[in-house]
Image (cartoon, coloured by chain):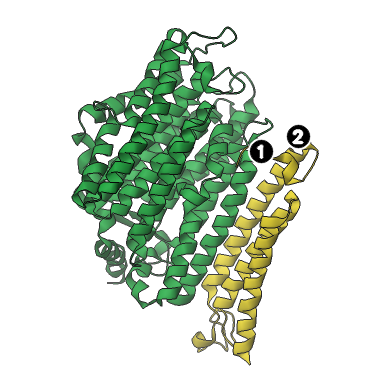
Chain colours: A green, B yellow
């Protein structure tokens, strides 16, 4: 085991604020240090994932205050799995954007990497913290860096997309704070395990109100239906790698916060059905909207929302199998959608409008990027030899075991819609003639390496899905077992007092 | 008497939240929207402080003359939460205002109706 959970938050935050100082010493450090930090985080959390798989949950008590009073970090199979996934995606995003804007200016790169580090630190914090107010703080850290990154390009629309995101984000953060106030006034605690232990003492009315405010507060990062108005604009206006970071890091943290709350914190009956219905609405609306888009990144953004809807459908099935399927979907989406964003933003690199029709015939001129984009498209719609097939199959079997035939039918119909709009793009890349004024962009070597790693993982999971199934099984068992979560957190406090 | 005051403060904080929401959702000027958000935050902070308040309370510090005052002590946790929330609210407001400056440079207006280029 290398390192400890708290370092996964402390080191990127420290690095974020050191970057301006390091840049004064040597400008290249601004680009190198984030990579080193993210590589350390990736290796450290992967080794802790191994440790957790064999030896059980790591609970870290901060500054000696035991579980119900202080803040603790919970590094369980589920959070370890998600942290490894998110730090890995952070590393890929860094690798892709290493030489980003090199020839333009030193200043944008500095800001870009500061906010990227803060984004990763916040998202990791959301996942591993065991305290709801702490989680609120990390949600705001992630949110503020996401607003700033959305407005990274000084073009006309990016500030507007960012402002829209900020408006929705801060309203929902307020509702999260109201939920925390309700819970604290009723139970007198902020620790998640303690809340899960005492939630049955809370009157039903307060409980439902708190749950609704919580869902409104976290749903914005998880892109669920009424709260995802920011996503298409933010994904479109943000730089390509940041779209990848949103899909691979921020949204995953939001989904985790949502399901931890629904599965562990609250015991309100019927929440699973609500999750299922919200997921279905999100899925259907987003996928039908995606067909009508004429901008490539906007289409990918709607597809990303739709995939999150599918994840919530799988969680809403409520069985162990359903949770397994949902986590598998999250893993696949976190790898495939960044690949699509990275290769897609290479395809439309030199275009001003980023329209889908501008990729016509690029298959001949940008062969490698086109193949990777096609691979991502095939994988995300769920063609058999690729990664997406196994996750979609596990969602369908989980639904079939519960007898939810209507849901299976809806998922299959939506998959057909998905195939239509992805294959339309792939068709344009390979079988259309290139327009005169489109200039193909030769991808830089680091971008090619980043995209190839993602492509290789898609093929690896596609041909051998067993490599991840142990971790997914442990993670889904961890999410379903509330009593074990409470016991794990409190066992540390007792051992200290003895 | 104290209970009435307490409910009055609860009512006041909830009406602050509602006033702020009204401003944030209906006003057309970007600056007014941000003011609305700040009012919402203020209402929530007041709500949190009220939750932790105790009648005739003292500061939660064991000092000479207050050795046995544990029952009268005001709950310090909501105050810590509010301090953190104020700092976060300040940061969000600063980011929002900087975005408004940039929007104004591009569009030369603060009316949200004249700015909308992106579809909702």
Q: Which residue is mark 2?
A: B106
User: Judging from the image, what secondary structure is the residue with disc 1 in?
Assistant: helix
Q: Which residue is mark 1?
A: A159
Callout 2 crowding tier (Cα within 10 Å): few <14, some 14–19, many ≥20: some
**In the rendered image, the vertical position of residue A138 relative to residue A21, given as above or below:** below
Position of the N terminus of chain B by quadrant = bottom right
Q: Residue furthest bottom?
A: B1
Which x, y percent locates residue A210?
46, 67
Cα separation, mark 2 vs mark 1, equals: 9 Å
Which residue is nearer to you in this view: A49 or A96? A96
**In the rendered image, the vertical position of residue A474 relative to residue B21, given as above or below:** above
Which x, y percent locates residue A494?
28, 70
Which residue is nearer to you in this view: A375 or B92? A375
Residue B78 lies in quadrant: bottom right
Q: Tag 1, which chain? A: A
* Picture residue at 70% right of the left edge, 59% below the top: B23
């Amino acid at each position: 085991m290398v390192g400890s959970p708290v370092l996964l938050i402390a080191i990127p935050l420290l690095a974020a604020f050191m970057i301006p100082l390091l840049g004064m010493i040597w400008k290249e450090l601004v680009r190198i240090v984030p990579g080193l930090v993210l590589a350390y985080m990736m290796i450290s959390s992967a080794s802790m994932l191994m440790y957790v798989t064999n030896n059980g949950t790591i609970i870290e008590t901060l500054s000696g205050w035991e579980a119900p009073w202080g803040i603790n970090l919970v590094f369980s199979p589920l959070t370890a799995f998600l942290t490894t996934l998110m730090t890995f995606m952070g590393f890929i995003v860094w690798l892709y954007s290493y030489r980003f804007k090199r020839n333009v200016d030193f200043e944008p790169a500095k800001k870009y990497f500061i906010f990227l580090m803060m984004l990763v630190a916040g998202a990791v914090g959301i996942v591993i913290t065991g305290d709801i107010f702490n989680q609120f703080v990390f949600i705001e850290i992630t949110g503020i860096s996401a607003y700033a990154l959305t407005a990274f390009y000084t073009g006309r629309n990016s500030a507007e997309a960012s402002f829209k995101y900020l408006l929705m984000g801060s309203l929902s953060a307020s509702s999260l704070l109201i939920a925390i106030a309700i819970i604290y006034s009723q139970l007198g605690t902020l620790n998640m395990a303690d809340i899960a232990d005492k939630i049955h003492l809370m009157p039903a009315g307060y409980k439902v109100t708190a749950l609704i405010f919580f869902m409104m507060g976290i749903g914005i990062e998880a892109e669920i239906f009424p709260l995802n108005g920011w996503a298409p604009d933010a994904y479109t206006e943000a730089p390509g790698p940041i779209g990848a970071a949103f899909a691979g890091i921020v949204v995953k943290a939001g989904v985790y916060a949502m399901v931890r709350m629904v599965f562990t914190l609250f015991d309100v009956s019927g929440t699973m059905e609500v999750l299922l219905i919200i997921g279905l609405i999100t899925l259907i609306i987003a996928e039908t909207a995606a067909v009508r888009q004429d901008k490539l990144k906007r289409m990918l953004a709607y597809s990303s929302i739709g995939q999150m809807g599918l994840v919530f459908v799988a969680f809403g099935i409520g069985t162990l199998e359903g949770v397994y399927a949902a986590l598998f979907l999250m893993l696949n989406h976190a790898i495939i959608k960044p690949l699509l964003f990275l290769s897609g933003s290479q395809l439309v690199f030199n275009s001003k409008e980023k329209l889908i029709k501008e990729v016509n015939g690029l298959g001949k001129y940008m062969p490698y990027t086109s193949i990777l984009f096609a691979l991502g498209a095939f994988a995300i719609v769920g063609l058999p030899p690729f990664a997406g097939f196994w996750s979609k199959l596990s969602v369908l079997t989980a639904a079939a075991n519960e007898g939810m035939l209507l849901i299976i039918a809806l998922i299959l119909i939506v998959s057909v819609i998905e195939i239509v709009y992805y294959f339309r793009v792939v068709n344009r890349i390979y079988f259309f003639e290139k327009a005169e004024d489109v200039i193909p962009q030769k991808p830089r070597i680091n971008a090619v390496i980043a995209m190839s790693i993602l492509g290789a993982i898609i093929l690896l999971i596609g041909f051998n899905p067993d490599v991840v199934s142990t971790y997914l099984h442990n993670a889904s068992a961890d999410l379903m077992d509330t009593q074990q979560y409470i016991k794990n957190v409190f066992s540390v406090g007792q051992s200290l007092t003895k | 008497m104290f209970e009435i005051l307490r409910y009055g403060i609860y009512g006041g904080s909830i009406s602050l939240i509602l006033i702020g929401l009204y401003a944030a959702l209906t006003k057309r000027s970007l600056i007014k929207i941000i003011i609305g958000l700040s009012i919402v935050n203020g209402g929530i902070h007041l709500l949190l402080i009220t939750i932790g308040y105790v009648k005739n309370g003292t500061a939660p510090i064991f000092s000479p003359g207050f050795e046995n005052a544990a029952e009268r002590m005001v709950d310090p946790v909501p105050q810590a939460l509010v301090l953190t929330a104020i700092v976060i609210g300040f940061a969000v407001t600063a980011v929002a205002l900087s975005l408004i400056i940039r929007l104004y440079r591009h569009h030369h207006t603060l009316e949200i109706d004249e700015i909308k280029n992106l579809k909702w």
